[in-house]
Image: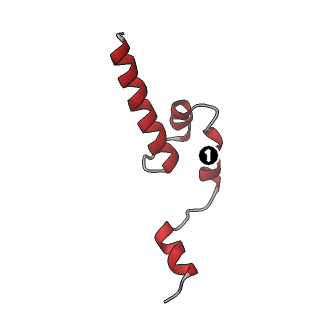
Amino acid sequence: MTRAEELETRRVLARYRRLILLGAVRLPLEAARRMVGPDCAYHLYSRESAPARSSARDRRRAIRPR
């Protein structure tokens, strides 16, 4: 693998890692844990155990009623 291919692979994996941690991509817990690595897996566990949260927009409206 050339250096350019290796850099492209790392860039794509970093993008998927970010999407997984943000919750934009839904994967089974085992697959997501392998992609994000052990250093960030605790974010996945907290999301799995927590109840579904409302969006940031809904939370802002709850804080500032009109």
Q: Kindly identify the residue that appears in the image at 47 percent across and 42 percent down.
A: 18
**65 over 52 or under it: above or below:** below
Residue 66 appears in the picture as rendered: yes
Residue 60 spot, x, y in % from top left: 52, 75
Q: Quadrant of the N terminus?
A: top left
Residue 34 spot, x, y in % from top left: 54, 30
Q: Quadrant of residue 2?
A: top left
Residue neighbourhood size for the residue with mark 1, other residues' Cα within 10 Å, grouped as few (<14), some (14–19), many (≥20): some
Residue 27 appears in the picture as rendered: no
Q: Kindly identify the residue that appears in the image at 55 percent across and 62 percent down.
A: 52
Work out whether residue 20 or residue 64 is closer to the camera in this orientation and state it.
64
Name, please, the residue furthest toward the top: 1
Q: Is residue 42 left or right of residue 55?
A: right
Which element is circle 1 on?
helix
**19 over 52 or under it: above or below:** above
Q: Kindly identify the residue that appears in the image at 59 percent across and 45 percent down.
A: 44
Residue 48 spot, x, y in % from top left: 60, 51
Residue 53 spot, x, y in % from top left: 55, 64
Q: Which residue is mark 1?
A: 43
Q: Kindly identify the residue that appears in the image at 51 percent across and 34 percent down.
A: 31
Q: Is residue 9 left or right of residue 51?
A: left
Q: Is residue 1 left or right of residue 48?
A: left
Q: Tell me, what colour scheme is on the image?
A: secondary structure
**3 over 33 or under it: above or below:** above
- The amino acid on which the numbered mark 1 sits, given as a three-letter code, is His
Labels in figure, total = 1
